[in-house]
Amino acid sequence: MARRRRVSKRELLPDPKYGSVVLAKFNNNMMVSGKKSTSEQILYTALQMIGERTGQDEMSVFQKALDNIKPVIEVRPRRVGGSTYQIPVEVPSNRRQALAMRWLIQYSRERSERTMAERLAAEIIAASNGEGNSVRKREDTHRMAEANKAFSHYHW
């Protein structure tokens, strides 16, 4: 945490092919060991596969998938009088997007298709249809928050 002043948020350049800042952010999250061109190649191949398989615009399918994964509410631990409670808290919009991207990449990597592009394309298509592991993760998060609704008065 900075002591002097608040650090300004860096502006991210939009991705070169689609002109989308969200896609550029997703590409940066997917990158492993600084290999951006490899990550970019996987992402564009996956988007091309999505266009072929669904017959729809790949960016709209990608956006719909992210919207289906974004959590609205999550639980945060709060220590009150010696015991820790899981308190439901609304998720800020930038964290929603970050969690959705993280879950999409995580569950894409766990799939059983041959290449990462195929895995990513399959998970995005499943998420845009409201199914898949990343959507299930969001539902589990919402279910956990619903179960701990009794502790919401501890919200700070």
Image (tube, rainbow, N blue to C red):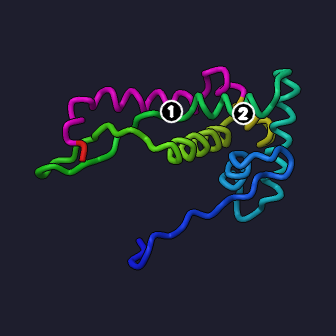
Residue 6 coordinates in the image, percent (x, y): 45, 70
Task: Give 123 or 60, whichever is nearer the viewer.
Answer: 60
Q: Regarding mark 1 in the picture, which secondary structure is present there?
A: helix
Q: Please, what is the dominant secondary structure of the magenta stretch?
A: helix
Q: How packed is label 2: few (under 14 Cα within 10 Å), some, or many (20 or more)?
A: some
Q: Residue at position x 13%, y 52% from top?
A: 82
Give the amino acid at mark 1: Lys
Q: Quadrant of residue 154?
A: top left
Extent of the magenta region:
125-154
Q: Residue at position x 80%, y 31% from top?
A: 58
Toward the left, the furthest residue is: 81
- What residue is shown with label 1? 137
Does 144 lie within the magenta span?
Answer: yes
Picture disc at residue 98:
none
Task: Give 94 or 125, whichever is nearer the viewer.
Answer: 94
Does 69 lie within the magenta span?
Answer: no
Q: Residue at position x 68%, y 33% from top?
A: 63
User: Please, is residue 77 above or below residue 67 in the view?
Assistant: below
Residue 11 coordinates in the image, percent (x, y): 66, 61
Mark 2 or mark 1: name the one nearer the start of the chain.
2
- What residue is shown with label 2? 62
